[in-house]
Amino acid sequence: MGKVIYRAWQLGAVFDAWDELFKYELWQKAFADTGLDIKFYAQRERAQDELLPWAHIDVGVSQEYIKAEYAKAITAEVTIDCREGPCNSCGLEKWDAGCGK
């Protein structure tokens, strides 16, 4: 993916989080130029135990909680916002002393 990102930058992809500057065709070309399949990264179903590219980033919410929420999403089960109900034990309580109360 590093080669794709670098190639997209070479092609002029900058500030892509801004809708008015995002150019999908540049990313398509970057994937084509580097020989990587964009669908593999963006559209395939991932195994539950697959290590995700962003797994090394600690956002405070546990992987177990994310997996449980995914399972609930498949069945359209709603998780009540813990600011309005009981703590969901997502893992954020370790970062915020007020969380979970």
Image (cartoon, rainbow, N blue to C red):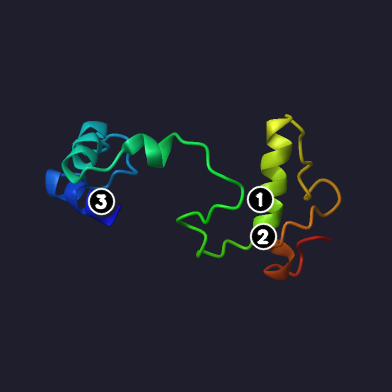
Q: In the figure, residue 64 lies in which quadrant?
A: bottom right
Q: Would you name the residue on which mark 2 appears?
A: 62
For the point 52% across and 60% down, which residue is it? 55
Label 3: element kind? helix
Q: Label 3: how many residues lie within 10 Å, few (<14), some (14-19) or many (20+)?
A: some
The answer for how far apart the CA atoms under marks 1 and 3 are is 27 Å
Label 2: element kind? loop
Q: Label 1: how many residues lie within 10 Å, few (<14), some (14-19) or many (20+)?
A: few
On the rendered structure, is 38 left or right of 47? left
Q: What's under tag 2, amino acid-wise?
A: Ser
Label 1: element kind? helix
Q: In the figure, residue 96 lies in which quadrant?
A: bottom right
Most foreground residue, 52 or 12? 52
On the rendered structure, is 95 left or right of 19? right
Q: Eyeballing the image, is 51 above or below 24?
A: below
Question: In the image, residue 62 lies at what x, y percent?
Answer: 67, 60
Q: Eyeballing the image, is 77 above or below 14?
A: above
Q: Would you name the residue on which mark 1 appears?
A: 66
